Image (spheres, coloured by chain):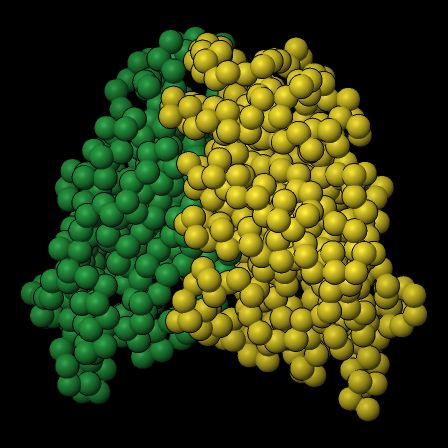
Chain colours: A green, B yellow
Amino acid sequence: MSEPCSAFSVKSADDVSQAVREGACVLVRGGATKWCEPPAPTSEWSAGRRLAPLLLDTRQLSGITEYEPDEYTFTARAGTPLKEIIETLGREGQHLPFDPLFADEGATIGGTVATAMNGPARLRYGGVRDFIIGARFVDGEGRQLHGGGKVVKNAAGFDFPKLMTGSFGRLGVLTEVTFKVFPKPEARMTVAHDAGDLREAVDLVCRIARGPFDAEFIELLPPGRVIVGIAGHAAALRPRHDAMRVALGIAFDESGIPPAISRRSIKVPLVPSFVSILDAKLASTGTVRRYSVACNAASIEWPQDKSLSELDALLASMQLGGVALNSGRIWLGSRTGLDFLQRVKTALDPQNKLGALT
Amino acid sequence: MRCVTFLSRLASLIPHARMIAGGAGLAAYQSDGLTAFAVRPRAVVLPDTADEVIDVVRLCHEHGVPFVARGSGTSLSGGSVPVEDGIVIGLNRMDRILRLDPDSRIAVVEPGVTNLAVTKAAAPHGLHYAPDPSSQQVCTIGGNVAFNSGGAHCLKYGMTTNHVLGLKVVLADGSVHELGGASLESSGPDLTGLFCGSEGLFGIALEITLRLLPKAACFHTVLAGYDTLQKAGDTVAAVVASGLLPGAMEIMDRLAMDAAEAAVSAEFPPGSEACLIVELEGTPEQVAAERPALQKILDCSGAIQIRIARDAVDRMRIWKGRKSAFSAVGRLSPDFIVQDGVVPRRALGEALRRIGESSKRHGLRVANVFHAGDGNLHPLILYDGRIAGELEKAEELAGEILVMCIEMGGSITGEHGVGLEKKAFLPRMFGADDIEAMQRVRRLFDPKEIANPGKMFPGGDAPAMQWRGLHPLEAAGVISRE
């Protein structure tokens, strides 16, 4: 689809404010690794308002503004490439423990927050929502707001930073974010076990997840391959692996790291008991499936020749929701809290300038 | 007339035995852990079910009567102090654990379930609920959610909000919503995260889905004594810089140690001005590998004495000494105020020096116990409320500490919430537009501003402060202000 909007490169929060105030509809794009193409101009845009929709490109709104390794915190402008952040933290032996996705492809920290996309290692300490501690953003009226703070512990005011997580720019345009970071594990080890069938594999995933093994990630590739990562002190990895093997009474092979999450993947949050049911329905459609974060998210690649509406209906019938990337739409299936969310939208974007919640 | 109609309709919703509408029974609800404030509510209801809560909230909305949800009343920021002419919805009877699923590692609980009850229920499955405020024996999950409570393990594990996956809530307008779910992952903006820490201003959580974690297999707990607070603080910085990620790092000063020692025998290092507790936890293999690194740091830290917990019993003794410090301070002073401002870790030494100066200037003793790993101070300002002007002096000193925390780039609250106590300081952390945006969100959930009004945001009528002495549970040593 051709871009229906005029692109506008923002360099500051003031630029974003101005764009939001002057624009009729504002959509945000960083590295475009999770890009959801804007819909064609609707009658709402073209008839009701004269101005064309505006596409804000945040890549010039870039740079780490503060980094305090001893405080375990950094602040960066929204368009800062993840790669730059990962490298900067790495030089100090630190990292973002939720395995941020698509860094090599050009993803930005703002897009990572807006889409709440986590990698497999979010299992151990939490996801984007658990490490974001502050945010500056521009609301649908062009006001520059901030929530949270710059210290690792803070309970003052409503938690707007968390609200921005997963909002896809619909509640505000992020301009700056502050994160808590952790020391980077000295070494990693990845092992795998073929459990035979899916049911056995899910059972194994649950046993590992609730055991005292401190797994960094547990991924399931159907039908039965379970991949486990452990991370920490180098000298302890082998003994930790041996202890886990003995406790579980199974053998692991030393496999490489699990395959990367695809940029076309659709995230379906779920719980382990739903895996078999969903998998049975998806298997016949030719969908590539993977169960991530100890079976807390299906990561699926829906066949390109199939309509997303079909998946939407399938997920809705199971009361599951989904988030699609690079697919032309964002939210699929069942949506919880939509009325609650609509009220938040009314408070922060009363003129509906920042795109629809559907 | 309006009042009579409201109360009679309330009485039709809640059986007589679970409603208090006058007399001495109301006194028990007029205050919470911040004992300097007291307001007698119009009535108290004790619902048994979520449906009863929803009915009561809808009635309040219809009549425009303010309500304050309350668990065990342990808020240290005055978060559950009643509102004049309003009612209290006491949730302690809703203490059922609705579901515990070890495979999904979740517990679905009602708001009146106590923090410790969750961990007890999870223990047979090798799991635990990580947030551990010191009042965990009695404080409820509903209150923990409302105020985003913390504890001693926040650097590594986060606060309450990091352990809440889903919520069923009734908003102040009586509408019921489900937010989040049972999965660690979610789709859409993080509404659960917005509700956590909203201090009861949106409505009441009816069902809470909590994330449980596997219990660590191994702990290594060290108590180190220092001749200055500065050295203890520097050691924390050295541990952080080393790349270790301890489960907890806590510091106590001399006054706090003396109080705790008198209450429980924790064997604090004699002759020291400060002590540091560091705890490594994880798999036995990982802890064994990390121990030498920690030991090396402590050996070079100028510690007067280093004591390693010999076994689980000894470890509990050290923690008991730490966790009893607050109630123990009650032995040193008829009353005290606890602050919980946060400063960047590098500013800890400077913050403590300035607190010491303020203490001298005001002529009030201050004991310091703090979560050093995350820069969360807990200065205990000792005063005697029976002496005219002392409470005001203590409040002034507390205010100075909050302003200092903001100036240092920190926060006015790490885990107690803003509540009544710190609402005047919120505008120092946030701009007028930020606060107005928060108010806009709130008014769409609570158009009549009846849910816990008068908390968090500046302005409005605040109840007068008065001397109340220790909280009854505190005097009994059951809860402590942390």
Q: Does residue B460 appear in this view?
A: yes
Residue B41, how many percent across, how many down?
Answer: 79, 71
Quadrant into which the C terminus of chain B falls? top right
> Which residue lies at the image location 81% right of the left edge and 47% below the top edge?
B334
Front-most of A311 and B118? B118
Quadrant into which the N terminus of chain B falls? bottom right
Q: Is residue B192 left or right of residue B419?
A: left
Q: Does residue B294 appear in this view?
A: no
> Which residue lies at the image location 28% right of the left edge and 45% below the top edge?
A66
Image quadrant where residue A253 sits:
top left
Front-most of B448 and A270? B448
Residue lying at the far right of the rendered structure: B23
> Which residue lies at the image location 19% right of the left edge and 78% below the top edge?
A22
Whether A90 is drawn above or below A165: the answer is above
Residue lying at the far left of the rendered structure: A2
Q: Is residue B308 left or right of residue A110?
A: right
> Which residue lies at the image location 31% right of the left edge and 14% below the top edge?
A254
